[in-house]
Image (tube, grey):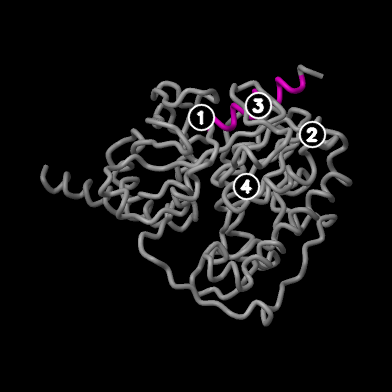
């Protein structure tokens, strides 16, 4: 009996180690708790990779005409609504030893990483709504967000990334959209680029009439960013945006010990939405929560509760079985879980808003 229990324990322990490795390597829930020293090179000496050609399907991670299998695990009904989602993935170029300023979208490892991380675990939330478009782009390296690098090439690297997104969006509008209403979505660096797309193409412009909703997740949005695009305060509202940054609720001592991806001081004046009830409620119950997408491709409903909300949302460790809780307990920075924690809530909400928009026509 004791040998059996020990054997089962070791199996579970090995499984836990495997999941922890997968969890970190997927690029969605890893974190750094100590200062990182980045290798770099002169921006003027950096050799840029080939530019994307967005009329060529090969420059798209996801396009209605691409044939990829990262969504094969999805069991949700595909609504096939006559709407488009344009999704921009977050910063995935993060290796501190990588001296590149911008990613090479034609590198096979880079493409696979994008597909099996952000596309699989984030963009998938919008896959069942209608057509999904995810452009590969020469995103800026994570270090550009550190002030010394921002002022010595980072700003130019970030601008190059946005110019790719802008080119992709213009190609999408001219070649693929065919007048369909649009959802704009992005996380972290992707949300920063999405904000600029809204400013350049939608805010106080005719295209705003085609905007179903914008999901600007994991960045700072203030009440000064848009003139005519409001923050939405009910789950059926259209023509506006939602935004949030997620933090784990911990003791003050633990909070002060960790270094989070999004600095709390930076988002002091940020707006924040409730990604469970989609209204002005500043807390939720477990029963309100539709589903956390875990790394084993399974959904866990009623596992996340928002404890409080102001310029950010605070959540406790998700309510799951013992071994998953042990795994999650090592994660203190929830920035990279901004989408995963509310994956099913986002999926349902994008469908609800799209149907509301279409019914208004």
- Sequence order check: which comes first, mark 2 or mark 3? 2
Q: Quadrant of the image for the C terminus?
A: top right
Mark 3 and mark 4: Cα distance apart in space: 20 Å
Please name the residue that numbered disc 2 is placed on: 208
* Residue 351, numbered label: 3
Q: Secondary structure at mark 3?
A: helix
Q: Nearer the viewer, residue 315 or 19?
A: 315
Please give the range of residues in magenta: 344-358
Identify the residue shown where x is 44% and y is 48%.
Answer: 264
- Marks 3, 1: nearer the viewer: 1
Left or right? Give the position of 84 relative to 225: right
Q: Nearer the viewer, mark 3 or mark 4?
A: 4
Marks 4 and 2 close (CB-CB < 8 Å): no
Q: Secondary structure at mark 2?
A: helix
- For disc 4, the neighbor class at 10 Å (few under 14, some 14 to 19, many from 20) is many
Dot 2 crowding, Cα within 10 Å, few <14, some 14–19, many 20+: some
Residue 347 highlighted magenta (yes or no): yes
Nearest to N terminus: mark 3 or mark 4: 4
Is the residue 306 above or below the residue 31 in the image?
Answer: above
Residue at the (38%, 56%) spot, across then down: 259
Mark identifier at residue 191: 4
Q: Residue at x 62, y 37 (%)?
A: 223
């Amino acid at each position: 009996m004791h040998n059996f229990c020990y054997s089962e324990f070791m199996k579970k322990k090995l499984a836990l180690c495997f999941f922890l490795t997968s969890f970190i390597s997927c690029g969605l829930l890893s974190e750094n708790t100590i200062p990182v020293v980045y290798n770099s090179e002169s921006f003027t000496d950096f050799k840029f990779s080939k530019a994307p050609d967005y009329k060529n399907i090969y420059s798209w991670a996801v396009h209605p005409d691409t044939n990829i299998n990262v969504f094969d695990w999805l069991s949700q009904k595909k609504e096939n609504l006559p709407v488009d989602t344009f999704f921009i993935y977050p910063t995935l170029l993060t290796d501190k030893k990588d001296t590149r300023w911008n990613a090479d979208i034609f590198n096979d490892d880079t493409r696979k990483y994008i597909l099996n991380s952000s596309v699989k675990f984030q963009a998938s939330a919008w896959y069942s709504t209608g057509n999904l478009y995810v452009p590969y782009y020469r995103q800026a390296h994570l270090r550009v967000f550190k002030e010394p690098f921002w002022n010595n090439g980072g700003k130019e690297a970030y601008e190059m990334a946005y110019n790719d997104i802008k080119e992709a969006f213009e190609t999408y509008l001219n070649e693929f959209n065919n007048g369909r209403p649009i959802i704009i979505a992005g996380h972290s660096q992707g949300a920063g680029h999405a904000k600029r797309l809204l400013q350049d193409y939608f805010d106080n412009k005719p295209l705003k009439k085609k905007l179903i909703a914008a999901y600007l997740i994991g960045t700072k949005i203030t009440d000064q960013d848009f003139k005519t695009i409001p923050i939405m305060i009910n789950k059926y509202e259209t023509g506006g945006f939602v935004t949030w940054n997620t933090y784990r609720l911990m003791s003050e001592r633990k909070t002060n010990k960790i270094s989070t991806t999004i600095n709390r001081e930076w988002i002091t004046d940020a707006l924040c939405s409730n990604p469970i009830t989609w209204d002005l409620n500043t807390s939720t119950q477990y029963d309100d929560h539709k589903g956390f997408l875990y790394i084993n491709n399974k959904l866990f409903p009623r596992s996340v509760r928002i404890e409080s909300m102001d310029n950010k949302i605070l959540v406790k460790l998700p309510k799951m079985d013992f071994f998953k809780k042990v795994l999650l307990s090592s994660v203190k920075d929830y920035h990279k879980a901004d989408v995963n924690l509310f994956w099913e809530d986002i999926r349902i909400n994008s469908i609800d808003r799209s149907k509301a928009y279409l019914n208004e026509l």
